[in-house]
């Protein structure tokens, strides 16, 4: 019997120049997203996910302590509280990626999960932190996540979150499946080049290996003053058979909305018994290498 969940992904270009006062940079991007979130709600979406650190540019293109002031506590910061109000208003779960401060000097790349009634369900902290040229200097800004791979029960679907660079590591993707995730959301900020080739390979592979849906989000446009590359959008939904069933454009703001039939998960897993045929008794050496 079909079990349909309507989901939306929001990809958007940065609004305010990065050189402006940080409060203005943040407020401009939040204001832009208010209309996009309403668009998802008007389309009947039950879950909407925003892109990685949605309320500004991808500032990790430089190493400057100025951006430490872009942080907020989770869940007690103003952005999460605003999104809780929107979730209640629209009866829609929202995944909100922000720059989190836990205490002075301790920062994480975090996604908060808010239920349809506005309740704060918990958070995921990005586990794998890149530090690669050109322009992905994330270890300057984030500690590695320490909350494992939680799965959040929305009542009508169980969801997990994996953030950007995490998608290159199959171990966490497997852990999310074993923890019960039916949809895994991956908010990202990635530019054209090597990663674009992998964009449609790795995450469909996770979907197949684990028999769940993937919802992959990427921002769009060039971001001055760094101009490290073109954020190529192409946000998409992928089913448990590895088929991309809906995809956004490469170069414009977009709210991508589609229906996911979660009953497909059981059908696929009856055919491909990957969880039954696992041999965890032989995998211990993987954590020792």
Image (cartoon, rainbow, N blue to C red):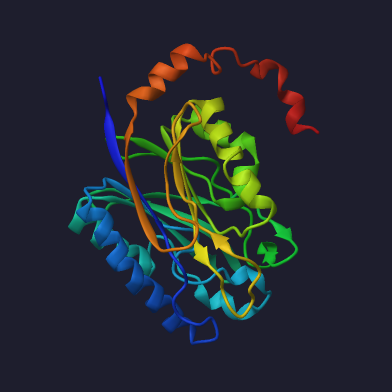
- From where the camera sits, is residue 59 visible? yes
For the image, the number of numbered tags is: 0
Q: Quadrant of the N terminus?
A: top left
Taking the image as shown, residue 236 lies to the left or right of residue 148, namely left
Instruction: Tell me the residue at 27%/28% (across/down).
Output: 3
- Place of residue 195 in the rendered image (x, y in percent of width and height, measured from the top left): 65, 51
From the viewer's side, name the closer residue of 272 and 96. 272
- Place of residue 26 in the rendered image (x, y in percent of width and height, measured from the top left): 43, 76
Vertical placement of residue 170 versus 93, above or below: above
| In the image, farthest residue toward the bottom | 20
- Place of residue 198 in the rendered image (x, y in percent of width and height, measured from the top left): 64, 44
Instruction: Tell me the residue at 56%/62% (across/down).
Output: 231
Q: Quadrant of the C terminus?
A: top right
- Place of residue 75 in the rendered image (x, y in percent of width and height, measured from the top left): 39, 60
Instruction: Tell me the residue at 54%/67% (across/down).
Output: 103
- From where the camera sits, is residue 100 visible? no
Taking the image as shown, residue 118 lies to the left or right of residue 200, namely left
From the viewer's side, name the closer residue of 234 and 9. 234
From the viewer's side, name the closer residue of 56 and 104. 56
To which quarter of the image does residue 59 belong?
Answer: bottom right
Instruction: Tell me the residue at 54%/35% (across/down).
Output: 204
């Amino acid at each position: 019997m079909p079990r349909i969940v309507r989901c939306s992904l929001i990809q958007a270009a940065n609004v305010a120049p990065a050189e402006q006062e940080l409060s203005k940079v943040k407020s401009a991007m939040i204001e832009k997203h208010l209309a996009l979130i309403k668009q998802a709600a008007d389309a009947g979406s039950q879950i909407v996910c925003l892109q990685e650190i949605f309320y500004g540019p991808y500032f990790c293109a430089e190493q400057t302590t100025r951006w430490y002031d872009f942080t907020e506590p989770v869940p007690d910061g103003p952005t999460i509280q605003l999104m809780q109000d929107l979730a209640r208003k629209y009866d829609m779960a929202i995944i909100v990626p922000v720059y989190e401060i836990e205490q002075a000097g301790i920062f994480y790349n975090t996604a908060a999960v808010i239920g349809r009634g506005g309740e704060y369900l918990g958070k995921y902290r990005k586990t794998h932190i890149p530090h690669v040229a050109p322009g992905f200097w994330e270890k300057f800004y984030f500690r590695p996540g320490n909350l494992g791979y939680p799965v959040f029960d929305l009542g009508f679907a169980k969801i997990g979150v994996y953030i950007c660079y995490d998608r290159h590591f199959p171990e966490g993707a497997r852990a999310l499946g074993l923890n019960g995730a039916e949809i895994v959301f991956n908010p990202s900020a990635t530019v054209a080049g090597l990663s674009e080739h992998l964009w449609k390979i790795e995450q469909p592979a996770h979907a197949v290996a684990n028999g769940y849906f993937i919802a992959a989000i990427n921002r769009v446009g060039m971001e001055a003053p760094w101009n490290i590359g073109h954020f190529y959008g192409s946000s998409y939904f992928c089913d448990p058979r590895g088929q991309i069933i809906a995809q956004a454009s490469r170069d414009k703001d977009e709210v991508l909305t589609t229906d996911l039939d979660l009953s497909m998960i059981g059908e696929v897993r009856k055919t491909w018994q990957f969880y039954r045929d696992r041999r965890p008794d032989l995998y211990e050496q993987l954590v020792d290498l």
